[in-house]
Image (cartoon, rainbow, N blue to C red):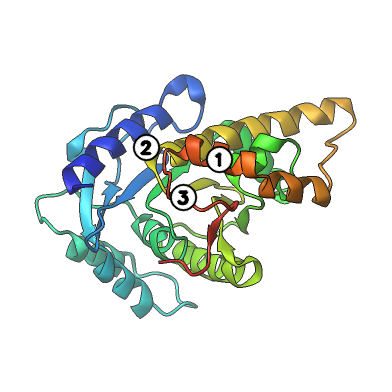
Amino acid sequence: MTARTSLEDLIALSHELGREERDLAILGEGNTSADCGDGTFWIKASGYQLRDIDASGFSRVDLRVVLTVLEEHPPADRPDDVRVRDGLRGALTDARHALPSVETFLHAVCLTEGGARWVAHTHPVSVNSILCSRAGAEPFLQHLFPDGIVVCGRRPAVIPYTDPGIPLALAARTELRRFREQHGETPKTLLIENHGLVALGQTVREALNITFMADKWARILQGTYRFGGPRPLSEDDVERIDSRPDEHYRRRRLTGDQSASDRGGRQGEAK
């Protein structure tokens, strides 16, 4: 996959996520990224809208430089906004590109610690109706129907609300490392309370499918409260769906990646 091909697919992904009738992101909300496979990645530039973004709305950045800026920032300190902006400009592979989104750091973490190749970060009305409630991410910690497991993974990673930018990226890194250590795989779905959804895909299709299924999951959750509340699947049922050979096959077909892992997340160490 060439950088040009990844950018073309990233634009198409962004347009699908930004369609107004889907209520996934409006105005300048949300951002997307794609790993170019050569130590760089495309990331949405600050201030652009997903629904009508074109090539000028994306910036190509050096992954190593972005991670260096992240590493050099003291975790307990409030970010120096000027330093962050200068760091983002310094990460550009082409100085003519627009200033990358402040969530470039979050995407860099998702592409490394999260093992993703395509990242879709949105603010779905359905998902945020729950993440912004007193329940937070708790309702998503148990599955309700089989396709939620197949598409979104056996379990999501969760981050409490954190200031966007470097603090959020650091929190995501901590959670993704904890998740991998505890479960032996990386997640497909990352939920940020009071903020939004991050889909971690191996293909552009998978990133889109995770987002769509998380939206459906949230809407079903909301509907259950009209009839006494959710009735989650048992752990045995979840394990059965996650391990069935026919569901492994369907998962690969849905992602469009025949080399994808047969498990709910990506097995072993993230790249």
- Which circle, 1 or 3, is nearer the viewer? 1
Residue at position x 14%, y 49% in the image: 97
Discs 1/2, front: 1
Residue 93, image x, y percentages: 14, 59
Residue furthest out toward the right: 228
The disc labelled 2 sits on which kind of residue? Answer: Gly
Which quadrant: the C terminus?
Answer: bottom left
Give the left or right position of residue 166, taking residue 22 as reference: left
Spatial CA distance of label 1 from label 3 is 10 Å
Q: Whole-percent x and y of residue 63?
A: 27, 64
Q: Residue at x 37, y 77 (%)?
A: 71
From what the image shows, is residue 33 above or below residue 159?
above
Q: Is residue 7 above or below residue 164?
A: above
Residue at the farthest front position? 245
Residue at which label 3 appears: 260
Q: Between disc 1 and disc 2, whose residue precedes?
A: 2
Q: In the rendered view, tell whether residue 270 sits above or below residue 190.
A: below
Q: Does 79 sit above or below residue 110?
A: below
Looking at the rendered structure, the kind of residue marked 3 is: Ala
Instruction: Left or right? Give the position of 145 relative to 72.
Output: right
The amino acid sitting under disc 1 is Tyr
The residue labelled by disc 1 is: 249
* Residue 134 visible, this angle: no
Task: Please say if the residues under marks 2 and 3 sit with CB atoms less than 8 Å apart.
Answer: no
Judging depth in this view, the residue of 233 and 138 nearest the camera is: 233
Q: Secondary structure at mark 2?
A: loop
Q: Which residue is mark 2?
A: 28
Badge number at residue 132: none
Measure the alpha-carbon separation of dots 2 and 3. Answer: 32 Å
